[in-house]
Image (cartoon, grey):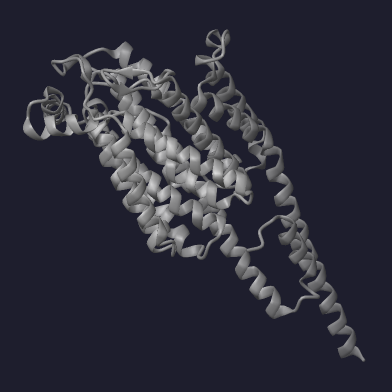
């Protein structure tokens, strides 16, 4: 009789301990919910940064929308920082060090310290935003909506650009300012968003939405050809190669191979001949811009050798380039203006994004949302790396947002894999005694 009583007490204590575990899980879930304020502010900033409403809505140009929404997101994060228990990811720490290195390079600049400091202050705005993404975007739904805002905004910009037909020397340019005013920058922004659009197409349940995404992607591709960007076309080919590998070959959608060739051929035929002429000029050596870019590249390498520790300061290469142009290479842009430490940190940030995606694809297999987004981000990041070899875009926010997306997706995939193991152990221990904890996990949306 005593033995039975002791067993009963032991079972009761085990049940109480497991109930406490379930309660702690629920408390952990509730602590994440207040971050909705930071998340909403982040969404507003993404709309402002990607769609640039102040450029096409009268009266908004006098309102610093980007600064206001960024400050709101940061304040919301600070207000709820007591609920956050996770450490900053490694790639975010790299960005912290990169920002610090650029501030040092600004103060040590032998060219123009005030200009370098101003550029660094503009770039430093990306740091709190990346922190907000890493901390506040803690569910797959939040990440999907964030990616939707970027992809849809760039898609609208591409459609408007094609519709307005604003040309610069026969090349399509964005009708808005910022990252879209230059044909090359417009092409890169469109290309890195295309894989994200395709992932959203696959995730859409409505046939109307799928058709809308497909139509928009065709217009975006057409816009890339109209920009007549040689670097853009090379970037598009590299992105398409990774995209087809991920979705057509590994994803079992072989029809995409034929479709890609067909669409590429048709768009090449219907786009202007400016792109073909520019390639012919570059190959024959008759176009001065191609030769000028080579000279700028080697000049940036020379500046890096002369100032290896701190460079000449952000945005100062143009003043000593001899032609008042940038490096047209994001890697030498960092090395010549921020020094070799800035170059190394920039590479580490991008490498961390690819590393995250590699782990995600091992953790999450099959046609799941996380897997689809990981494949799309792989193509987008590969496209950015190739495109950055031809453009000075190291201070733009887009690459750091892409890496931040991989950070969030890695955290989601890791949590999903961890709770899948917990579910397996629950089923082995018995469904009745683990029911409270199981219910908490299911209510959090962590079920695989």
> Is the residue 224 above or below the residue 104 in the image?
below
Tell me where residue 320 appears, x and y as whole percent: 16, 16
Q: At x 59% / y 60%, what residue is drawn?
A: 416
Tell me where residue 149 appears, x and y as whole percent: 55, 35
Tell me where residue 279 appears, x and y as whole percent: 17, 34
Quadrant assignment, res 230: top left
Q: Is residue 32 left or right of residue 110?
A: right
Nearer to me, 19 or 362? 362
Residue 208 visible at all: yes
The quadrant of the rendering that contains the C terminus is bottom right
Tell me where residue 19 appears, x and y as whole percent: 80, 64
The residue furthest left is: 285
Q: Is residue 402 left or right of residue 277?
A: right
Quadrant assignment, res 118: top left
Q: At x 13% / y 24%, what residue is drawn?
A: 292
> Is the residue 171 above or below the residue 263 in the image?
above
Nearer to me, 30 or 24? 30
Q: At x 51% / y 25%, what residue is drawn?
A: 51
Nearer to me, 116 or 40? 40
The residue furthest right is: 1
Q: Is residue 4 left or right of residue 264?
A: right
The quadrant of the rendering that contains the N terminus is bottom right
Residue 339 visible at all: no
Q: How many discs mark residues in the rendered view?
A: 0
Q: At x 42% / y 35%, what residue is drawn?
A: 220
> Is the residue 27 above or below the residue 291 in the image?
below
């Amino acid at each position: 009789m005593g033995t039975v009583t002791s067993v009963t007490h032991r079972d009761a204590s085990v049940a109480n301990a497991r109930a406490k575990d379930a309660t702690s899980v629920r408390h952990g879930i509730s602590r994440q919910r207040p971050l909705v304020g930071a998340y909403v502010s982040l969404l507003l900033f993404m709309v402002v940064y990607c769609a640039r409403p102040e450029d096409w809505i009268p009266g908004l140009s006098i309102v610093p929308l980007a600064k206001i929404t960024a400050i709101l997101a940061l304040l919301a994060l600070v207000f709820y920082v007591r609920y956050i228990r996770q450490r900053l990811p490694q790639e975010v720490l790299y960005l912290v060090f990169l920002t610090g290195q650029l501030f040092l390079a600004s103060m040590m600049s032998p060219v123009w310290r005030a200009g370098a400091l101003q550029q660094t202050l503009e770039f430093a705005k990306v740091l709190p935003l990346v922190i907000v993404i890493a901390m506040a975007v803690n569910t797959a739904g939040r990440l999907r909506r964030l990616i939707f805002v970027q992809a849809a905004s760039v898609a609208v910009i591409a459609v408007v650009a094609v519709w307005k037909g604003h040309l610069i020397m026969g090349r399509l340019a964005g009708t808005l300012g910022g990252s879209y005013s230059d044909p090359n920058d417009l092409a890169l922004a469109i290309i890195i968003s295309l894989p994200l659009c395709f992932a959203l197409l696959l995730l859409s349940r409505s046939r109307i939405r799928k058709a809308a995404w497909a139509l928009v992607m065709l217009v975006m591709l057409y816009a890339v050809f109209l920009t007549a960007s040689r670097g853009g076309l090379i970037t598009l080919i590299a992105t398409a190669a990774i995209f087809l590998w991920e979705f057509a070959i590994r994803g079992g959608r072989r029809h995409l191979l034929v479709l890609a060739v067909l669409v590429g051929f048709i768009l090449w035929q219907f786009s202007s001949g400016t792109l073909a002429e520019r390639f012919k000029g570059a190959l024959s050596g008759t176009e001065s811009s191609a030769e000028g870019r080579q000279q700028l590249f080697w000049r940036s390498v020379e500046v890096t050798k002369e100032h290896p520790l701190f460079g000449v300061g952000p945005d100062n290469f143009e003043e000593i380039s001899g032609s008042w142009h940038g490096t047209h290479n994001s890697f030498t842009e960092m090395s010549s203006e921020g020094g070799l430490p800035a170059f190394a940190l920039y590479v580490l940030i991008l490498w961390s994004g690819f590393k995250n995606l590699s782990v995600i694809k091992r953790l999450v297999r099959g046609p799941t949302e996380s897997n689809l987004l990981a494949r799309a981000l792989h193509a987008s990041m590969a496209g950015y790396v190739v495109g950055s070899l031809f453009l000075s875009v190291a201070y733009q926010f887009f690459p750091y947002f892409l890496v931040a997306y991989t950070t969030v997706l890695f955290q989601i995939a890791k949590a999903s894999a961890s709770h899948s193991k917990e579910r397996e152990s629950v089923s082995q221990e018995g469904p009745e005694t683990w029911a409270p904890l199981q219910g908490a996990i299911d209510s959090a949306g962590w079920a695989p």
